[in-house]
Amino acid sequence: MSCAQHKDSEKYRFDEDKLLERIKTLSSDKYEGRRTGESGNDSARAYIIKEFKEIGVSGFRDDFEQPFTFKLSNEIIEGVNILAEIKGKDVPQKYIVVSAHYDHLGSRNNEIYNGADDNASGVSAMLSFAEYLMKNPPKYSVLFAAFDAEEIGLQGAKHFVNTINKEKVLLNINMDMIGRSPKNELYVVGGRYHKPLEKIIAGFENPTSTKLLVGHDGTDGKVNWTMSSDHAPFHQNEIPFLYFGNEDHEAYHKPNDDFEDITPQFYKNAVEIILSILLEIGEKGV
């Protein structure tokens, strides 16, 4: 994989301050860990929708909220996906779905699980993409999906995939945990299942000093992430996907997954990498 080593001080194509401000806000105690069905999750959803509106992005088919229900043990849980769209200038009837789950684990034993990396990092990145694409209209339509209930069995993503016209979806780009890596390594999964995507990743010229690694895809002996997050229902329905994530760390699913331990330079580089690949796919198609 080719990698152009540019200085990290170079200007990014998004507002760095807003990126960090949003992840800090979403992972604050105010949102009580964002557990599905609880008030903190409702407040986080309102915040994300407010941000989309301020950017100027419309709700998908004029509605930001996609409610759904599912059964957990003997309890009926109500979840709500957040959907927003930017129409493509050339091929508006085809969609690239950019996703990141906004729910997390809530509170346990009087400790709040704030989920800064998991997955306020992905949601904040998504909002940065929306800002860029509002100023630089994409060829294909982009549907932003902030999924709910990922932590309870990918329920929001499953509902979404079951309700869309799959023929209109070019691919899914999913982000889950992209904000924290002491090794300065971002992994991408999914290219092996779709040759045009594999070719794009293999030829990608990395504009940052962060390593983009192909792995965790069932080929390298590492934990296989093919079914690990909201890209799984897309893959099960034969929709191409790319999943971006950093490896698990000591704060994974712990109450100390806090904003203060995000690795900011890695995070900004990861967002730049994923945006670059999104734009390349938007130009070339798959």
Image: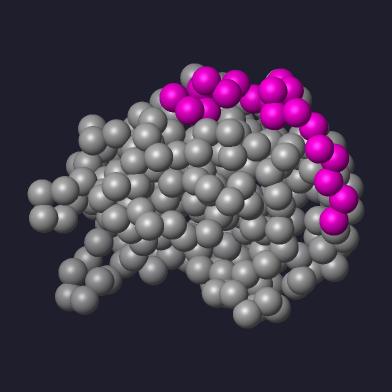
Determine the image quadrant of residue 164.
bottom right
Q: Can residue 13 be seen here?
A: no
On the image, the x and y values in percent for residue 243 come to 62, 58
Quarter containing the C terminus: bottom right
Q: Which residues are magenta?
A: 1-21
In magenta segment, residue 9: yes
> Against 202, is 88 above or below?
above
Residue 266: percent from the left, percent from the top? 59, 39
Residue 272 in sight here = yes
Up/down of 7 relative to 273, above or below: above
Q: Main secondary structure of the magenta part?
A: loop
In the image, what residue occupies the spot 22% across and 41% down? Answer: 32
**Left or right for 39, reference 180:** left
Which colour scheme appears in the figure?
one colour
| Residue 245 pos. (x, y %) | 57, 55
Query: In percent of the image, x 42 and y 50: which residue is there?
Result: 118
29 relative to 110 in the view: left or right: right
In the drawing, does residue 273 fall left or right of residue 200?
left
